[in-house]
Image: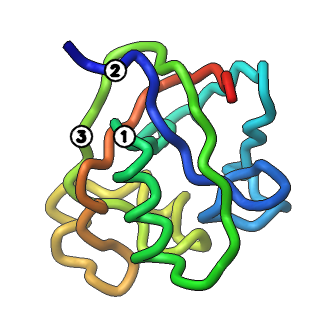
Amino acid sequence: MTDKYKYKVVDLNEGSCTVRPFSKFYLMYKIGNHVKAIKGSLGIMVFPTKKQASDFKDRIWGGKILKIKKVVSIGNPTYPAMVAQNAINISAFNKMTAKERRLDNRNCMTAPMYTVCYPEVIVVD
């Protein structure tokens, strides 16, 4: 049986940790929020377990102080092979083909282990 909850890493303001607050991709993850992915994006990136989210937080962000939010996923999951390497390139990344993503190691990187994306989530904790 799989856990119905997933785990999202967010910044201290409870927004997307990988993008800047002025970006259209900066979504807020406050308790009770129903958050929908930006159209054309990979979806809302979450992790199946809190441990996996914590490992991602520690491995990718090191000393940066971040939070882990518990969410309920909505919709069909996708398992991306590649993700944008930095927030500035998300729009360009979303327009690339899979082949272009594999060849562009400056703007794209292999998705963190256990990454799963959903079209929507509801923040529960």
Q: Give the number of the disc on residue 79.
A: 3
Q: Is residue 49 above or below residue 90?
A: above
Estimate how packed mark 3 is, as few (under 14), some (14 to 19) or many (20 or more) residues with alpha carbons within 10 Å: some
Estimate how packed mark 1 is, as few (under 14), some (14 to 19) or many (20 or more) residues with alpha carbons within 10 Å: some
Residue drawn at (15%, 62%), measured in percent from left and top? 99
Q: Nearer the viewer, residue 44 or 65?
A: 65
Instruction: Quickly name the residue at label 2.
Output: 3
Residue drawn at (72%, 60%), measured in percent from left and top? 11
Residue drawn at (75%, 67%), measured in percent from left and top? 20
Alpha-carbon span between mark 1 and mark 2: 8 Å
Q: Nearer the viewer, residue 79 or 66?
A: 66
Quarter of the image where the C terminus is located: top right
Which element carries disc 1, helix, strand or loop? loop
Q: Position of residue 59 (x, y in %)?
A: 40, 76
Q: Give the number of the disc on residue 86.
A: none
Q: Is residue 3 left or right of residue 85?
A: left
- The amino acid type found where label 2 is placed reads Asp
Q: Give the number of the disc on residue 49.
A: 1
Residue drawn at (17%, 69%), measured in percent from left and top? 102
Estimate how packed mark 2 is, as few (under 14), some (14 to 19) or many (20 or more) residues with alpha carbons within 10 Å: few
